[in-house]
């Protein structure tokens, strides 16, 4: 039996346009962009073309685009890099992040505190809104950076970052958003929203793993976290991954071009899957249902089921899904995201399905059927007759 | 149980060691639909990485590699909560009582197979397998018999006396007829990455081998088991001081401070008075043993029956007689035995066949037999 991949929020395969663009660099323009000969010049040209392409796709200037090695690195460079800049000016960094951020942001914020600064979280409600009073209090209390993701990776909530960004800017505080799950699924533009720092990764948008981007609005100061040569304006030293940058730029460009039509298609698939599961499973929870959701993530809660056995059972049926976030597999308790939104959720197995480019209606129908088949073996779930 | 439309699905416990790797490989060769599983028994984040611990994170990675090479799915199941309650807590409380626990027996009886069985049922499996060196004979269903592994130096039947009878029909032990050497050869022939992995000897949750650290962490401060006490002879003569009775086990000779002139062994631990009693081999010999927490994998033998009993891992079974009518279940040895250690397992045999077992509650003392 062939397998159905419904875990695109964990990672995606590389699309052919990206592969071809990368191969052209790997095979042909392999030079070091810093070299003063033809090979170097050609590589530098590819790199700058890539930068231009990403900048146009998100409404930035190309001088504001930095190629980095993935989403986690981008988040760390933004939050810790900014904290180091604040410290360099003699200030005390204070990172304020939403309670449902990815571990990359939470980890970086915690590290700000480890290095003598502070960090705190802003509660998020099930409808996706943030506790604005807490935001205002922390802004008044000396927050130096606020980081709120655009789309949550586990439940797919599309957060109201415009409001947060505007309030943050009104206090003269820097605003960062992790848009790793957002690009290609919802509109992402640094022109429409006063975003100072924005993080992207390639492998969620049919690009390569280990490729990413950090947007840094002109005038926003961040310090490098690693040191060496002058590549990427000395913010991310090390010989550039030109092939990665080219692949990233193609992935970003196509994701933005196709965003509207792909979002409509994915939403249809997600809603179909959701209704099939709702019809088959009593007591099914739809996480994120009262919030605005990005179209590509369906997170459901099934009561009284062993989440590990459920996932394993689905895998044996040829369905690749995940337990919320791939980073928390094996954890028996609800993830920090689900806990922040809904409390402890004892005995509820969370299951995340994320359709993508290759997903068809037939795939999600089969996935729903397989889920019901697996659940039939699980004693405490009442599958509807 | 038989489904002729498809091959039987077997869930095999894979620790990432060579034995369970080969067990999985053999089942694949035999045509089963094999699913690998590693039980994550405790949180490794605090422990230093050690390749010696077979169920550590390295173990999970190795089990996944082997599964990939065999073309079978593999899952990790978190059983930390059960393991902590049933194995680690028991381990600590046994030492606190002056006894010497068998955590691997507890794990097999209470956690590993029970949890495997549960997951196997959820995954539509027809059977459960492990890489233990024991044999199981399914010919006399519905009550199969467990036998020692043919490799006497690796036989692990001592650890499996606690398996409930109702589980036996579902169990497969593909290594029971093999020697360790044959298993290694198989692993090399199959090119398994675990072929030359060293044996794991330590208790998996005490990777350093020093269980006192664990006791200090998990017992309340100044617990009597870790406080100084007297080393005495059975007649009350004081020979010295010790730094906590939890450091001792009955039968141990080393670590007594030495210099007593004659060979002395720990023959009793008196938790109530924090005394460690030492004596000669002769003084330490017990005529019999009182056994609790019994589990029978066959019909319990009547009073007066002869029975074989193994009271230590890697010791032969010795002959004894059952005394079960008046008071606790007791075995009287044909010949007095050394180091009858409370907390350890006593496993019953009829020849090679495992009949059941229990936990040693008390060694009988010569004068009390009457």
Image (spheres, coloured by chain):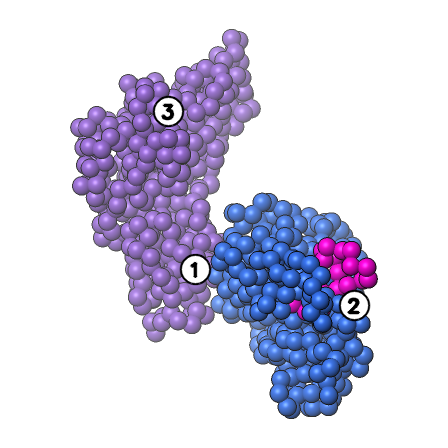
Chain colours: A purple, B blue
Label 2 – label 1 distance at C-alpha? 56 Å
Foreground residue among B10 and A117: A117
Residue shown at 30%/66% (left/top)?
Answer: A283
What residue range appears in magenta? B253-269
Mark 3 or 1 closer to N-term?
Answer: 3
Say which quarter of the image contains residue A94.
top left
Residue A9, percent from left and from top: 39, 45
The quadrant of the rendering that contains the C terminus of chain A is bottom left
Q: Which mark is residue A84?
A: 3
Q: Is residue B37 above or below residue B158?
A: above
**Residue B46 in sight from this viewpoint:** yes
The circle drawn on residue A307 is: 1
Residue nearest the observer in this picture, A340 or A186: A340
Chain to which the residue tagged by mark 2 belongs = B
Relative to A381, say whether A253 is above or below: above
What secondary structure is found at the residue carrying circle 3?
helix
Q: Position of residue A381 (x, y in %)?
A: 38, 69
Magenta stretch prevailing secondary structure: loop
Q: Residue at 62% of width from left, 60% of height from top?
A: B229
**Disc sitting over residue A90 in the figure:** none
Q: Is residue A61 magenta?
A: no
Instruction: Give x and y (percent) for residue A336.
Output: 36, 49
**Disc ID at residue B280:** 2
């Amino acid at each position: 039996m062939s397998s159905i991949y419904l875990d695109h929020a964990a990672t995606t395969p590389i699309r052919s346009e990206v592969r071809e663009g990368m191969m052209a660099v790997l095979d042909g323009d392999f030079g070091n962009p810093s070299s003063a000969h033809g090979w170097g010049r050609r590589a530098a040209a590819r790199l700058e073309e890539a930068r231009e392409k990403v900048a146009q796709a998100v409404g930035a200037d190309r001088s504001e685009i930095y190629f980095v090695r993935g989403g986690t690195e981008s988040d760390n460079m933004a939050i810790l890099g900014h904290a180091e800049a604040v410290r360099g000016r003699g200030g005390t960094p204070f990172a304020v992040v939403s309670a449902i951020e990815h571990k990359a942001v939470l980890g970086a914020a915690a590290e700000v505190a480890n290095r003598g600064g502070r960090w705190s979280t802003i509660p998020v409600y099930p409808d996706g809104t943030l506790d604005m009073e807490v935001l205002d209090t922390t802004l008044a209390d000396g927050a130096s950076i606020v980081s709120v993701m655009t789309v949550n990776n586990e439940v797919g909530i599309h957060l109201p970052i415009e409001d947060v960004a505007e309030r943050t800017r009104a206090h003269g505080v820097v605003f960062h958003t992790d848009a790793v799950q957002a690009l290609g699924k919802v509109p992402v533009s640094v022109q429409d929203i006063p975003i100072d720092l924005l993080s992207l990764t390639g492998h969620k948008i049919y690009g390569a793993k280990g490729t990413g981007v950090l947007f840094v609005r002109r005038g926003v100061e961040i310090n490098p976290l690693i040191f060496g040569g002058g590549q990427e304006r000395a913010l991310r030293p090390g010989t550039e991954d030109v092939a990665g940058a080219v692949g990233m730029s193609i992935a970003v460009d196509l994701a933005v071009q196709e965003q509207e039509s792909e979002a409509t298609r994915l939403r249809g698939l997600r809603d179909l899957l959701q209704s099939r599961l709702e019809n088959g499973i009593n007591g099914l929870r739809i996480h994120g249902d009262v919030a605005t959701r990005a179209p590509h993530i369906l997170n459901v809660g099934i009561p009284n089921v062993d989440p590990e056995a459920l996932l394993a059972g689905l895998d044996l049926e040829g369905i690749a899904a995940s337990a919320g976030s791939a980073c928390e597999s094996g954890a028996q308790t609800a993830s920090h995201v689900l806990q922040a939104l809904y409390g402890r959720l004892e005995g509820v197995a969370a299951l995340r399905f994320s359709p993508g480019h290759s997903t068809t209606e037939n795939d999600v129908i089969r996935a729903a059927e397989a889920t019901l088949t697996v659940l039939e073996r699980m004693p405490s779930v009442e599958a509807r007759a | 149980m038989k489904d002729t439309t498809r091959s039987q699905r077997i869930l095999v416990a894979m620790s990432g060691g060579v034995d369970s790797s080969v067990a999985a490989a053999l089942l694949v060769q035999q045509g089963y639909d094999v699913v690998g599983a590693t039980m994550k028994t405790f949180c490794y984040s605090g422990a230093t990485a050690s390749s010696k611990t077979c169920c550590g994170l390295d173990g999970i990675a190795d089990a996944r590699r082997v599964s990939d090479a065999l073309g079978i799915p593999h899952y990790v199941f978190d059983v930390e909560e059960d393991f902590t309650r049933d194995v680690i807590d028991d381990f600590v409380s046994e030492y606190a009582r002056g006894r010497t626990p068998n955590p691997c027996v507890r794990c097999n009886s209470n956690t590993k197979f029970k949890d495997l069985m549960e997951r196997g049922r959820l995954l539509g499996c027809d059977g459960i397998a492990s890489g233990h060196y024991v044999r199981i004979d399914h010919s006399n269903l519905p009550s199969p018999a467990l036998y020692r592994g043919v490799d006497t130096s690796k036989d692990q039947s001592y650890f499996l006396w606690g398996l409930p009878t109702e589980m036996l029909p579902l169990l497969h032990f593909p290594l029971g007829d093999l020697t360790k050497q044959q298993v290694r050869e198989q692993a090399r022939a199959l090119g398994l990455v675990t072929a030359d992995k060293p044996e794991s000897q330590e208790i998996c949750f005490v990777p350093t081998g020093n269980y006192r650290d664990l006791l200090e962490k998990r017992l309340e401060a100044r617990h009597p088991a870790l406080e100084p006490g007297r080393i005495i002879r059975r007649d009350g003569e004081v020979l010295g001081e010790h730094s906590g009775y939890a450091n001792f086990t009955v039968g141990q000779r080393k670590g007594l401070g030495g210099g007593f002139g004659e060979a002395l062994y720990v023959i009793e631990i008196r938790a109530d008075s924090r005394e460690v009693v030492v004596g000669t081999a002769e003084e330490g010999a017990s005529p019999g043993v009182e056994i609790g927490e019994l589990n029978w994998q066959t019909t319990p033998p009547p009073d007066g029956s002869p029975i074989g009993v193994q009271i230590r891992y890697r010791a032969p079974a010795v002959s004894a007689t059952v005394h079960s009518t008046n008071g606790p279940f007791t075995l009287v040895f044909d010949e007095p035995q050394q180091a009858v250690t409370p907390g350890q397992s006593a496993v019953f045999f009829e020849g090679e066949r495992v009949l059941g077992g229990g936990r040693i509650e008390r060694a009988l003392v010569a004068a009390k037999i009457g």
